[in-house]
């Protein structure tokens, strides 16, 4: 484990920010899809009274 840590490189700030953008974009997409599915479910289950 020690040898692996010695070989590991610290990522640059640009790489870190790029990965962070992708992660936030993915969270946003998944959250939006979940919200749309929830809203559709609410409309479909409420139906005409």
Image (spheres, rainbow, N blue to C red):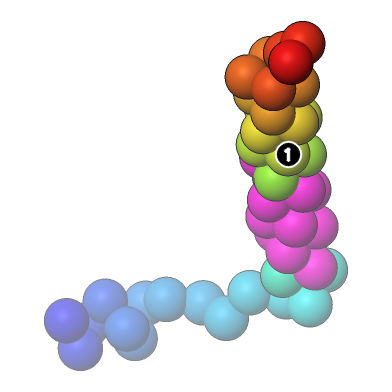
The answer to whether 4 is drawn above or below residue 41 in the figure is: below
Q: Which residue is at the far front?
A: 49
Please tell me whether the stretch drawn in magenta is mainly helix, strand or loop: helix
Residue named by callout 1: 35
Mark 1 burial class by Cα count in 10 Å: few <14, some 14-19, many 20+: few
Whether residue 15 is situated above or below residue 46 in the rendered picture: below
Residue 14 position within the rendered picture, expressed as x and y whole percent measured from the top left: 83, 68
Residue 29 figure quarter: top right
Residue 22 position (above or below residue 45): below
Report the quarter where the C terminus lies: top right
Q: Residue at x 77, y 11 (%)?
A: 48
Quadrant housing residue 15: bottom right
Judged left or right of residue 9, residue 15 is right
Visible residue check, residue 1: yes
Residue at 75% over, 57% down: 24
Q: Where residue 11 sits: x, y (%)?
A: 63, 74
Task: Tell me which residue sits at (51%, 77%) in the image.
Answer: 9
- From where the camera sits, is residue 29 visible? no
Instruction: State which region is magenta.
Output: 17-30
Report which quarter residue 10 is drawn in.
bottom right
User: For residue 25: magenta?
Assistant: yes
């Amino acid at each position: 484990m020690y040898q692996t840590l010695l070989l590991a490189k610290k990522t640059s700030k640009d790489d870190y920010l790029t990965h962070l953008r992708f992660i936030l974009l993915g969270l946003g997409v998944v959250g939006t899809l979940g919200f749309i599915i929830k809203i559709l479910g609410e409309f479909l289950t409420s139906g005409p009274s």
